[in-house]
Image (tube, rainbow, N blue to C red):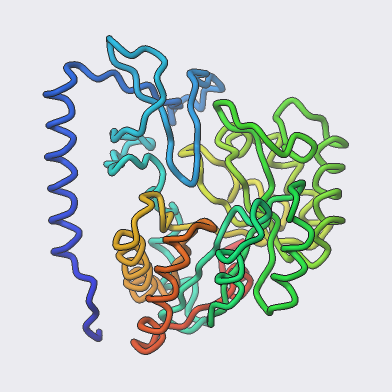
């Protein structure tokens, strides 16, 4: 295997720093009570803790202390996923939550070129400025996710398609906590089939060149089997793939899509949960390293200044090192159905 600037020692050192910082937080603040919406994997209970939780760019906000009941702040905690414990750190709860299917990729995806890097950029539709122009000038096959129902959604989707990037619908879905915006497009678990079908169809009308969909927020919706089965049936009818952004540890996205015969894939981690240029560059190196191990890897970023700058710096370097940037559609069909 060829040498690369990213190494395991760097990850180990970073993990130790995070553990030390977490210990200091507990010592300074006193007892820290973390509230997290969990589900017993053995019982598959439908109970969900409705404490206010917000997901923004892959970050989950919820911290309760004896002196600050109800305040929303970034935190680090341990998240239980069935019988495994994953440390979730650096003010990010789900940013490094890996796909449950990644361990099998080496044997299931031999048809694709190794070292395929998949970068998805979320949240287009809000802005029309030099940052958008910068993303539309990047020299790589990138997948751009546009939120329907915003001022620049339709125009941005046309630009994305015309510039040769891959366009997908960044579909607003119900979160566990409050999530304003896109009220005419957001999917809720209380909706019937026709309401869900209608909203997906309206998004497609706004973005007719979209080839797939991923969830915007959706920590509650993607964990709801019936609602996701309805989405899956419409995506099958529209011949769109689904990228699960994994904003919930209890998502049923993959199971729902496979049952309906929809091409589906999960992201590996978020690239910019910490909005810092060096951090994002390191995450891109980590994504490349993971693609070497698995055959490909999927990272999600957001339409932000530091994310743009990191891609401008990293794309030429990774290409020179032999990595290939590919669209989601180039790897999604190789996931087991």
- Which residue is drawn at the image coordinates 32% and 33% (left, top)? 75
User: Compared to 162, does 68 lie above or below?
Assistant: above
Percent of width and height locating residue 81: 38, 37
Q: Is residue 68 left or right of residue 208?
A: left
- Which residue is drawn at the image coordinates 56% and 70% (left, top)? 135
Q: Is residue 304 left or right of residue 272?
A: right
Percent of width and height locating residue 178: 58, 26
Give the quarter of the figure containing the N terminus: bottom left
Question: As drawn, which residue projects farthest toward the front?
Answer: 130
Give the quarter of the figure containing the C terminus: bottom right
Percent of width and height locating residue 165: 65, 74
Can residue 252 be seen here? yes
The picture quadrant where one finds residue 271 is bottom left
Can residue 258 be seen here? no
Closer to us: 204 or 8: 204
- Which residue is drawn at the image coordinates 34% and 35% (left, top)? 79
- Which residue is drawn at the image coordinates 46% and 27% (left, top)? 39
Q: Is residue 32 left or right of residue 148?
A: left
User: Compared to 16, does 5 lie above or below?
Assistant: below
User: Compared to 307, does 325 lie above or below?
Assistant: below
The number of discs equals 0
Q: Is residue 116 left or right of residue 279?
A: right
């Amino acid at each position: 295997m060829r040498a690369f600037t990213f190494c395991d020692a760097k990850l180990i050192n970073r993990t130790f720093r995070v553990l030390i910082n977490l210990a200091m937080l507990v010592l300074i603040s006193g007892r820290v009570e973390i509230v997290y919406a969990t589900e017993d994997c053995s019982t598959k209970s439908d109970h969900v803790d409705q404490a206010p939780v917000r997901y923004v760019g892959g970050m989950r906000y919820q911290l309760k202390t004896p002196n600050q009941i109800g305040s929303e702040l970034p935190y680090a905690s341990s998240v239980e996923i069935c019988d495994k414990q994953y440390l979730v750190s650096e003010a990010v709860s789900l940013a490094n939550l890996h796909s449950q299917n990644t361990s099998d990729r080496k044997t299931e995806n031999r048809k694709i070129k190794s070292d395929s890097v998949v970068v998805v950029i979320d949240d287009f539709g809000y802005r029309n400025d030099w940052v958008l122009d910068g993303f539309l000038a990047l020299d790589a096959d990138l997948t751009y996710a546009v939120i329907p129902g915003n001022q620049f959604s339709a125009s941005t989707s046309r630009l994305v398609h015309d510039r040769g990037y891959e366009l997908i619908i960044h579909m607003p879905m119900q979160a566990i906590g409050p999530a304003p915006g896109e009220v005419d497009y957001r999917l809720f678990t209380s909706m019937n089939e026709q309401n869900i079908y209608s909203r997906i169809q309206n998004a497609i009308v706004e973005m007719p060149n979209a080839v797939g969909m991923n969830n915007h927020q959706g920590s509650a919706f993607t964990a709801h089997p019936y609602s996701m089965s309805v989405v899956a049936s419409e995506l099958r009818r529209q011949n769109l793939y689904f990228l699960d952004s994994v904003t919930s540890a209890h998502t049923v996205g993959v199971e729902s899509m496979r049952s309906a015969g929809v091409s589906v894939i999960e992201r590996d981690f978020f690239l910019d949960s910490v909005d810092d240029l060096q951090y994002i560059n390191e995450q891109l190196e980590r994504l490349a390293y993971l693609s070497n191990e698995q055959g490909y890897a999927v990272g999600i970023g957001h339409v932000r200044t530091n994310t743009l700058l990191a891609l401008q710096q990293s794309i030429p370097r990774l290409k020179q090192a032999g990595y290939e940037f590919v669209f989601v559609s180039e790897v999604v069909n190789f996931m087991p159905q």
